[in-house]
Amino acid sequence: MYIFIVNPVSGNGRGLKVFRKLMKSKVYQQMDAKYYLTEFPGHAEKIAKLVVQEENVKAIVIIGGDGTVHEVINGMGDSPIPISFIPGGSGNDFRRGSGIKGSSVEILNRVIKGENLLNYWKGNYHIDNITKRQFINSMGFGFDAEVAKHANQSVYKNFFNKFHLGTLSYCIALIHVLLRFKPFIAELKLDGKKEIITDCWMVTIANHPYYGGGMKIIPTAKIEPNNMPILIIHGISKWKVLGLFLTVFIGKHITFKEVDLLQVENLSVNANKRIYYQVDGQTGSCETCTIVKNKKHIQIMGSNF
């Protein structure tokens, strides 16, 4: 049986529209399938916890945005059930990062045929020595997290989502946050080696290049089991930050002298104050966090890689 977990409000209602269209297709009607519609934030995670206990589940197909994928993988834990993703959100960076292309029917056809299984390694993170969770795309601390928070709470996000221009809300939020953002002091442990960043703007870890709706935040990032690519921005002027982010879509920001790119197996972040973080586009605040790669891979169905 194939299980569909659908977020009907993702992408300002796009998730439900995608699923309704898919239900009319011959490939869906011939499947042994069951679907769940999420009803509130965190519901996809609760559904996934129940689904992994069912028998004969061939795959979980997620229709929604990156936040929905985040909830599902945390609900699944380390279950070996494969997943697939049919984009219905505003950013859909998981689609880009895992090479899922084509229409919803084309993606589902590849899932049914069992073609192009992709091994994928998630990240584990531990917030303030309390909360342990997993991320599928990326995790960031500082400036980009405040931008994500501002964009998520903005009145214009839904407007841009109607026209599939979700990235514009991120760009507007960036300018708002830029005017008031204050750098922080970060004590980093990179594979156990301590480093102090006194004028830190952001620290970002990614499983693939994309975030923020198509920005190539770490263009060299690869899906791999051990190393984690890390980007650090520090000691930069506010107006140069604006110029830096204008080049993120083509990945040229890594040429700025204020940008460091590293590869580590584990990382800890300890800030001198409470700072915002973003994980798969969802936001919160913390003082400390540790991040490592999850050694157990999951399988992504329907990829073009």
Image (cartoon, helix red, strand yellow):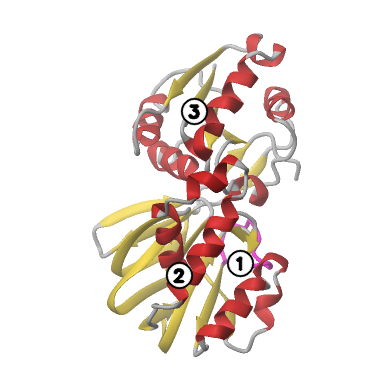
As drawn, is 97 to the left or to the right of 56? right
The quadrant in which residue 132 appears is bottom left
Residue for point 40% across, 78% down: 181
- The amino acid at mark 2 is His
Label 3: few (<14), some or many (≥20) within 10 Å? many
Q: Would residue 287 be seen by someone viewing this image from the given angle? A: yes
- How many numbered discs? 3
Q: Secondary structure at mark 2?
A: helix
Residue 188, image x and y in percent? 40, 80
Q: Secondary structure at mark 3?
A: strand
Pick whichever, 20 or 33, lies toward us. 20
Label 2, on which residue?
176
Residue for point 40% across, 41% down: 77
Q: Are marks 2 and 3 in contact (CB under 8 Å)?
A: no
Sooner in the amino-acid sequence: mark 2 or mark 3 = 3
Label 1, on which residue?
217
As drawn, is 81 to the left or to the right of 110? left
From the image, state whether disc 2 or disc 3 is nearer to you: 2
Residue 20, image x and y in percent? 58, 19
- The amino acid at mark 3 is Val
Residue 223 on the magenta segment: yes
Label 1: few (<14), some or many (≥20) within 10 Å? many
Sooner in the amino-acid sequence: mark 2 or mark 1 = 2
Pick whichever, 11 or 283, lies toward us. 11
